[in-house]
Structure formats: C-alpha cells, structure tokens
C-alpha cells in the first residue's frame, strides 16, 4: 500500500490565496476549506487508499517558548484562521483521518505519521505532500518521499542531497545554520547555503563540531536545530489501516450543504463506490 500524508495547513493557505485570483470566489466563507477537501478527494480518486491530513489547529506550538520570534498567528487573516476548525470537521465528516495539532505543529504530525507508517512492512511507500523544507528530514531512500504538488517534484534521498547539499538526516543542522524565515529564526551570521552544506558534509552534525567552531553562536545554532527538528513521537494511530478511506460518514452531506458545496457529497459518494 501507499500512504499519502497531506499538509492541511499548507493546502489551506494555498487555496485561500489562490482564490484571490478568481473573481468572486474569495467571498465564499469556506472556499479555502472546500478547496482542501477537493484536493484530498482528488488524491483518493487517483487511487489513494490510505490518507491522513495534519493541520495547525493552533498556529503557536512549544517552539514559541524556545524562541520568542518563532512564527505565530499574528498577521494571519481572520478569514483564513476561521477556516481551520470547519476544515477539520469537514475532513472528519468525509471519513479522512485528520490530526488537528495544538502543542505540536502539523509538520510534527506529518513526521510522526511517516515514522509510524514506514515501520509497517506492508507499506510500500509513504508520500508526504508538502513543499516545506522541514519535511525533507523525514525522507528515507525512495520509500519515504516528499511531494511538491505545485512544483510537480518528488524528492527522494538523492534529490534532497542534490537540492540542499546534505542528506535528509542533516536537514535540521542545515536549517539551523542558514535559518528559516518562514518559521522566524535567522540562522548563523556569515553562513550561507553553500558554506553550511560544505561544513556539514565535512564535520557531520553540529554537536560533533569542535567547541570553538561557531564561537559564541554555538548555543544559538543548537537551539535553532532544536526548532528545526521535527517531533516523531505523536501517537496518531496504532495501525496504518486506521488511515484507510472507507467513504464519507453520514455527517458529510449536511457539512457540504452548510459549506455551500452540496455536490461534494455526491463526488465523495461516487469515489466510495469505486473503492477497491
């Protein structure tokens, strides 16, 4: 089986701002949430049998206590934030495994789900659908891969090294050195992508570097690595078959009607009829 793990937060943002380019569409109060459900349903229609979606139910996480400038919900439009809960409810009603994260982030859920799925010998491949560079650390050979839907790219371990200059296991170290503007930490002054890759390739993880290698920036680099390292211990499911899609629940028809997209229920029903 192939397990598909989707970044619901990324998809919600993508659809929300994508609708801005469609005249009149942005006025739909749940337009972005509906777009995410259509994306998930498309994955199922194309043969996906085991699907899970992670969301940032609360944008803030434990990392905000470690670094005061870490990303928050400040500046995120209310019209976007207000669609997280309806999205989570809609996914659950459609019969899709959904993980609304509070103390951890959606990325941590994806990393945890990938670890749990990959531990099952029945799983042939795990596809993590997000362009977020943090998730590159979860890639394992060509069995756990990262898929960039918009860029139409699949990153296996060789592709991760080609892109970043380091293997997946060193992605947290790489991000600690170069920083991640999206997450709100700056990296180490004077170290760019090329230098970071060269140093990591030669020395390995930051912890193994000589004590004086980064001078006064050593502790900050280790803190940034902690921010960049995804948690893989979230107890999301016990058996990968919990991710098998078995069709929409009875709650989906009223949800779709309230969202102003009643045709979505019929589409989900048709997909259920075609289940293997």
Image (spheres, rainbow, N blue to C red):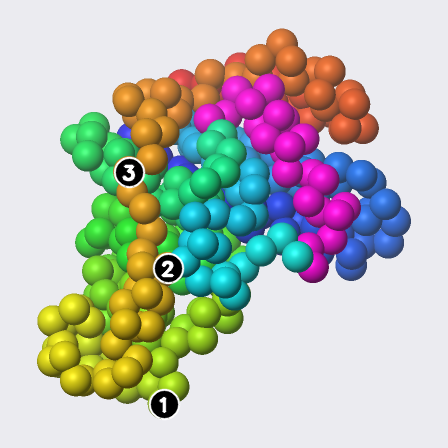
Tally the numbered discs.
3
Q: Quadrant of residue 252?
A: top right
Give x and y (percent) for residue 77.
74, 53
> Is residue 86 covered in magenta?
yes
Mark carried by residue 233: 3
Residue under the point 28% across and 38% down: 233
Determine whether 44 is above or below 21 in the image.
above
Are the residues flagged by discs 1 and 2 in contact, CB closer than 8 Å? no
Mark carried by residue 255: none
* Quarter of the image that includes the C terminus: top left
Circle 1 crowding by C-alpha within 10 Å: few under 14, some 14–19, many from 20: few
Residue for badge 1: 190
Q: Quadrant of residue 224?
A: bottom left
- Which residues fall within the magenta stretch? 75-97
Determine whether 97 is above or below 33 in the image.
above
> Is residue 249 covered in magenta?
no
Give x and y (percent) for residue 56.
53, 43
* Quarter of the image that includes the N terminus: top left
The secondary structure type at the circle numbered 2 is helix
Mark carried by residue 227: 2
Q: Residue furthest bottom?
A: 190
Residue 165 left/right relative to 257: left
Residue under the point 69% across and 59% down: 75
Give the camera-side residue of 11 and 275.
11
Query: In this orientation, does residue 153 appear?
Result: no
The secondary structure type at the circle numbered 1 is loop
Give x and y (percent) for residue 197.
25, 79
């Amino acid at each position: 089986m192939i397990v598909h793990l989707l970044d619901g937060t990324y998809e919600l943002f993508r659809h929300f701002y994508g609708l801005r380019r469609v005249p009149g569409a942005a006025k739909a109060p749940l337009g972005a949430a509906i777009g995410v459900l259509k994306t998930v349903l498309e994955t199922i229609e194309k043969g996906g049998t085991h699907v899970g979606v992670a969301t940032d139910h609360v944008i803030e996480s434990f990392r905000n206590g470690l670094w005061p400038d870490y990303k928050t919900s400040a500046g995120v439009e209310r019209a976007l934030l207000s669609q997280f809960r309806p999205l989570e409810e809609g996914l659950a009603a459609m019969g899709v495994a959904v993980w609304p994260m509070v103390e951890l982030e959606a990325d941590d859920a994806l990393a945890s789900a990938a670890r749990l799925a990959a531990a099952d010998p029945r799983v042939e491949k795990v596809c993590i659908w997000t362009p977020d560079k943090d998730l590159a650390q979860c890639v394992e050979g060509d069995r756990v891969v990262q898929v960039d839907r918009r860029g139409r790219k699949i990153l296996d371990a060789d592709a991760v090294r080609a892109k970043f200059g380091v293997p997946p296991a060193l992605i947290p170290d790489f991000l600690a050195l170069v920083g991640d503007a999206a997450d709100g930490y700056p990296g180490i002054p004077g170290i760019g992508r090329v230098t970071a890759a060269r140093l990591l390739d030669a020395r390995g993880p930051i912890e193994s570097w000589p004590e004086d290698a980064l001078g006064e920036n050593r502790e900050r680099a280790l803190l940034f690595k902690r921010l960049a390292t995804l948690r893989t211990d979230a107890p999301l499911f016990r058996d990968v078959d919990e991710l098998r899609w078995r069709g929409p629940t009875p709650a989906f028809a009223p949800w779709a009607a309230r969202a102003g997209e009643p045709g979505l229920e019929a589409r989900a029903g048709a997909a259920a009829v075609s289940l293997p």
